[in-house]
């Protein structure tokens, strides 16, 4: 899949523009002429609503403030899928997995099923210590659910099943298939499940995992590394079940995931997206952490190299903490973690290059030179910046 150019069509950012058939056709034409080969179309957004008529999940047009009224009784996924196939694109449906509510709006499945919500252990500056809070009261903008609850797992898999059964997609992408951050989940369920994994009861909860200094700095407890391994294993188990479901439907369906390329920090998200053959050696890993990797399960992976600096030298010159805080460094780190077992498509966030088109072009070329292609996030920025020609220019240079 060398020289793949993937364009992500985020529903939230493009709902207004793509509400007309004319704009949909203009978009498809621009993407085709720019050399795009694959489209990622949102089927389920980060707040839990879906973009197609579902018997399981709420439709986007049901959001209370009416922001997606133009999509009432319409099917965004089908409309984009059919046009995409007409233009010869490989079209993948994206599903945001474990985010199920919008805090600002106070709505979503996580509000209806409050028992599903992630429990956070986060620092309270007023009390100068940590406290347990439910997801709807956390600092996150999305309301997350606990991925180890059987009912949550069943719900998310049922939506995936619904998409692949009813739509002629060429594959699926999972996003937010993770924990929200290092502070969740600290529910009783997670405690008991972790104690089973550990083989002993925790003497101090949650301090054996993490605690805080008075200024809010996180302190890792004696079992933090095993906790990181356990969390990563939980997400990998879900990924394996999702893959089995997809491949049972059709072995030729592509199965992929988007993650951030910052592997040394990804314990925050409770994910090991590396290969089981890659054994990382960080101060938060165990000797068996590598066994939790899910990279080998994927047909390809998109890793977000979301950095304004393109080269490692630029990152060093700008005094970044490490040279991997760059597109080049992020790609190298991704390739190392996948150990040659899974194609890596380096991914760019266009807003990182606002007002600097030459740096954007340089970033695309770096992705295509060093990885199996480039994923561009997101479509809305192309209309805002008028950068279609830059993608086309990068494609011609290859």
Image (spheres, grey):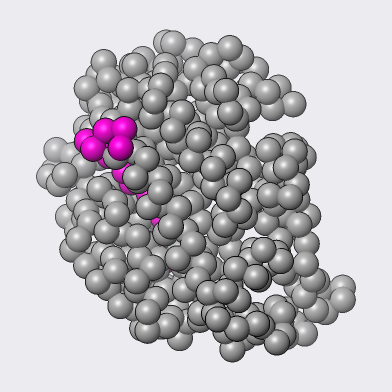
Q: Residue at x 67, y 56 (%)?
A: 118
Q: Is residue 206 visible?
A: yes
| In magenta stretch: residue 125 | no
Could you say which is closer to the camera, residue 208 or residue 14?
Answer: 208
The structure residue drawn at horizontal position 55% and vertical position 36%, both measured from the top left corner, is: 45
Q: Name above or below for residue 284 compared with residue 240.
A: below
- Split into 4 quadrants, where in the image is the N terminus? top left
Q: Position of residue 11 (x, y in %)?
A: 51, 31
Q: Which residues are magenta?
A: 248-262
- 31 left or right of 226? left
The image quarter containing residue 286 is: bottom left
Is residue 57 positioned above or below 186 on the image?
above
* 19 sits left or right of 119 in the view: left
Q: Is residue 234 above or below residue 279?
A: above
Quadrant into which the C terminus falls:
top left
- Residue at (49%, 12%) from the top-left corner? 20
Relative to residue 395, is residue 270 drawn left or right? right
Q: How many numbered discs?
A: 0
Q: Residue furthest right?
A: 126
Question: Looking at the picture, how far across and down is residue 49, in whole percent?
Answer: 60, 32
> Residue 259 occupies which quadrant of the picture?
bottom left
Question: Percent position (x, y) of residue 193?
Answer: 60, 68
Residue appearing at x 23%, y 37% in the figure: 251
Is residue 260 shown in magenta? yes
Whole-percent x and y of residue 366?
23, 56
* Residue 99 horizontal side relative to residue 334, left or right: right
Q: Would you place residue 5 above or below residue 324 in this image?
A: above
Front residue of 354/201: it is 201
Q: Is residue 36 visible?
A: no
């Amino acid at each position: 899949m060398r020289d793949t150019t993937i364009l992500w069509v985020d529903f939230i950012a493009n709902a207004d523009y793509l509400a007309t058939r004319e704009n949909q056709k203009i978009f498809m034409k621009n993407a085709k002429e720019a050399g795009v080969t694959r489209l990622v179309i949102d089927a389920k957004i980060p707040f839990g609503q879906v973009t197609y008529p579902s018997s399981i999940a709420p439709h986007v047009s049901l959001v209370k403030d009416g922001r997606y009224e133009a999509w009432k009784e319409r099917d965004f996924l089908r409309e984009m899928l059919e046009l995409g196939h007409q233009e010869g694109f490989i079209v993948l449906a994206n599903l945001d997995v474990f985010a199920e509510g919008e805090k600002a709006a106070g709505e979503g499945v996580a509000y209806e099923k409050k028992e599903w919500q992630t429990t956070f252990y986060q620092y309270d500056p007023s009390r100068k210590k940590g406290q347990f809070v439910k997801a709807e009261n956390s600092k996150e903008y999305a309301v997350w659910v606990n991925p180890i609850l059987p009912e949550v797992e069943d719900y998310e898999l049922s939506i995936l099943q619904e998409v692949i059964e009813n739509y002629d997609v060429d594959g699926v992408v999972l996003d937010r298939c993770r924990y929200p951050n290092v502070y969740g989940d600290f529910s009783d369920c997670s405690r008991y499940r972790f104690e089973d994994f550990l083989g002993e009861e925790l003497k101090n909860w949650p301090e054996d995992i993490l605690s805080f200094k008075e200024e809010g700095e996180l302190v890792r407890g004696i079992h933090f590394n095993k906790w990181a391994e356990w969390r990563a294993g939980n997400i990998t188990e879900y990924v394996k079940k999702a893959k089995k479901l997809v491949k049972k439907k059709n072995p030729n369906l592509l199965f992929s995931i988007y993650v951030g390329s910052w592997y040394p920090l990804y314990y925050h998200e409770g994910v090991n997206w590396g290969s089981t053959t890659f054994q990382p050696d960080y101060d938060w890993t165990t000797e068996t952490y590598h066994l939790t990797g899910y990279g080998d399960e994927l047909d390809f992976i998109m890793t977000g190299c979301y950095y304004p600096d393109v080269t490692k030298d630029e990152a060093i010159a700008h005094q970044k903490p490490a040279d991997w805080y760059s597109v080049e460094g992020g790609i190298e780190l991704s390739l190392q973690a996948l150990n040659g077992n899974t194609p890596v498509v380096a991914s760019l966030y266009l807003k990182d290059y606002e007002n600097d088109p030459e740096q954007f072009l340089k970033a695309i070329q770096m992705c295509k030179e060093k990885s199996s292609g480039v994923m561009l996030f997101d479509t809305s920025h192309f209309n805002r910046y008028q950068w279609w020609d830059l993608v086309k220019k990068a494609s011609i240079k290859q």
